[in-house]
Image (tube, rainbow, N blue to C red):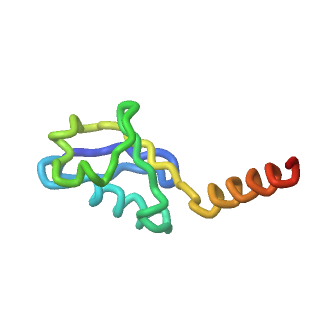
Amino acid sequence: MAKLKIAGAWSGVLEVELDEWTVPMLREEVAKRSNCGSESINLICAGKVLKDSDGAQKLTQLGFKNNSKVLGSRVCADQGKALKDELMAEEERSI
């Protein structure tokens, strides 16, 4: 078993099988441990945002090794929508 060091929304070490785990599996586990939905977690490793479209590939195929570090950041969809609505309202007032 390999270990991945996770920081961000949840910090700790996950023991995973790099030849079996995929990005969606990793995202689901980090989301479960950080008490939020998997759709609200962004995973970043080696400066690359991991996408679920990479889901068919195993973590080893994506370049993960034992002791790889992953940043799991929490994303709030409502926060982005609120900012967009606020900018649109401000734009309408200026017209």
Give the residue at x 17% y 53%. 56
Depth order, front residue of 79/21: 79
Q: Residue furthest right?
A: 94
Residue placed most toward the observer, 76 or 15: 76
Q: Is residue 38 above or below residue 42?
A: below
Question: In this orientation, which residue lies closer to the viewer: 12 or 89?
Answer: 89
Q: Quadrant of residue 25?
A: bottom left
Is residue 2 left or right of 72 when viewed as pictured?
left
x%, y% of residue 55? 23, 54
The vertical placement of 42 against 35, above or below, is above
Is 64 left, or right, of 37 in this rendering? left
Residue 51 point in image, percent of width and height = 33, 49
* Residue at 21 percent of width and 39 percent of height: 62
Numbered-mark total:
0
- Residue 38 seen: yes
Image position, residue 93 (x, y; %):
87, 53
Q: Is residue 13 left or right of residue 94?
A: left
User: Which residue: 81% across, 54% down?
Assistant: 92
